[in-house]
Amino acid sequence: GQNIDQPTEMTATEGAIVQINCTYQTSGFNGLFWYQQHAGEAPTFLSYNVLDGLEEKGRFSSFLSRSKGYSYLLLKELQMKDSASYLCAVREQSNYQLIWGAGTKLIIKP
Amino acid sequence: EPEVTQTPSHQVTQMGQEVILRCVPISNHLYFYWYRQILGQKVEFLVSFYNNEISEKSEIFDDQFSVERPDGSNFTLKIRSTKLEDSAMYFCASSEGRGQETQYFGPGTRLLVL
């Protein structure tokens, strides 16, 4: 079956670091995406991993381990505007569809 | 920066009516997608479209739904005989290619079926 798991909600403090985990079980794998979604808005692309390892992009980094079916999104120097849901999505190899996790709601406190 | 646009931003309709949701993908993109997100739930894939035909569709995308690219810029999702459970945010997305290309999302159309 297909399953993508993320924590439902996390809380962190402004200026701190937070790691949002995602585990997946899909019939195929052709890349993992992280998107940010503010309430009532569209998902916006953050990162893409297809090979194992860490991809860094400014304050955001994303890690992938294909053998473990595991990824995380690391957010540094948290800002209040980072309060949003973070969606993990896996592209299946067979049909290129994006399979989405339910998202992790990140709450940033001053 | 180019972006995907969608109209209308909000649509209210009566159960049983037909609605057409419109999208203008990024101009040099070749692959187009529709997703829906019921309030508080996951994003769900509906359909992908390439070269004027459907390339993939999910179980959700039944005969009630259809897509069309009526001209060189618009990409539409038609929902026939709407049901209460069709109430959701509908997102259009586009990508340059199919394989490892990032999909860029439009702002969405919030559909409310009464």
Image (spheres, coloured by chain):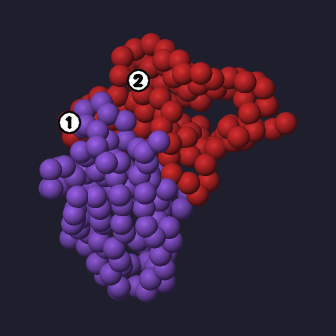
Chain colours: A red, B purple
Residue at screen point 62% across, 53% down = A39
Q: Earlier in the sequence, mark 1 or mark 2?
A: 2
> Where is residue B100, by image quadrant?
top left
In the picture shown, does residue B88 fall above or below A45?
A: below
**Image location (x, y in percent) of residue B31:** 25, 46
- Quadrant where the N terminus of chain A sits is top left
Q: Is residue A85 visible?
A: yes
- Which amino acid type corresponds to the residue marked 2 in the rendered image? Asn
Report the residue that reaches farthest toward the right.
A110
Marker count (numbered)? 2
Residue at position x 53%, y 18% from top? A56
Q: Quadrant of the C terminus of chain A?
A: top right
> What label does residue A63 carry, if any?
none
Of the pair B68 and A31, the residue shown nearer to us = B68
Q: Which residue is identified by label 2?
A: A49
- Splitting the image into 4 quarters, where does residue B14 fall? bottom left
Chain to which mark 2 belongs: A
Could you classify mark 1 by the number of other residues whose Cα lies within 10 Å: few (under 14), some (14-19), or many (20 or more)? Answer: few
Give the Cα distance between marks 1 and 2.
Answer: 18 Å
Q: On the image, numbered disc 1 is attached to which residue?
A: A94
Q: Chain of mark 1?
A: A
